[in-house]
Image: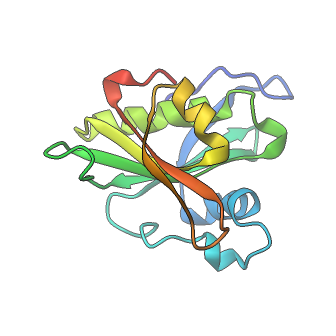
Amino acid sequence: MPAEETLEGRTGAAVVVREVTLDTVLPLRHQVLRAGQPIDVARSKQDGLPGTVHYAAYEDDTVVGVVTQFPDDTDLAPGVHAERFRGMAVDSAWQGRGVGRVLMRAAVELARSRGAEVLWANGRDTALDFYTRIGFRVIGDGFVDGVMHLGHHVVLARLDELHP
């Protein structure tokens, strides 16, 4: 479980990352990543799998960011235990204020605790600058997702390369 972070929120309270249920992450995931679609479109097949962990970043009682993580080895890092994250979403009023970094610190901590060496995701092209700033590499050709029809690339890093 991640420790409390000292990122200061609007009220002066610390932004805290907590392990939560899917029901906690779905509303913000839907709002940020699947706006205009039915809420069920914000669900993923990995949400209920063993080993899946959902995190939310809170300011007081308000969820300001979410991410979901699960074990998922990749052919891009053969022979290495990997963790994948998805559904990374930060409330638009909080973007650029460190919430994504706090969530990624929790993801790295979880991956390390489970013996992973690599963390990866299918990152939206609009978020690639964020991912590369914290140490991810953009891998291969881009693709367009089948739901929101937005450009994505795989982002991948060894845990020792990340500096969220």
User: Which quadrant holds residue 82?
Assistant: top left
Count of marks placed on residues: 0
Return the residue found at the far front: 141
Q: Is residue 2 visible?
A: no
Look at 62% across and 47% down and name the residue there.
Answer: 125
Q: Nearer the viewer, residue 48 or 149?
A: 149
- Quarter of the rendering containing residue 108: top left
Tell me what residue is drawn at x 55 percent, y 42 percent. 18
Q: Quick check: 15 above or below 144?
A: above
Coloring applied to the structure: rainbow
| Residue in the image at 53% along x and 29% along y | 132
In this rendered view, identify the residue nearer to me: 4 or 32: 32
- Residue 61 pos. (x, y %): 75, 45
Q: Is residue 121 above or below residue 110?
A: below
Residue 4 in picture, x, y percent from top left: 57, 27
**In the rendered image of this protein, does residue 114 appear above or below residue 86?**
above
Position of residue 8 measured from the top left corner of the image (x, y, whole percent): 75, 22
The quarter of the rendered structure image containing the N terminus is top left
- Residue 97 horizontal side relative to residue 132, left or right: right
Whether residue 93 is visible: yes
Q: Residue at x 77, y 66 (%)?
A: 35
Residue 162 position, x and y percent, is: 42, 25
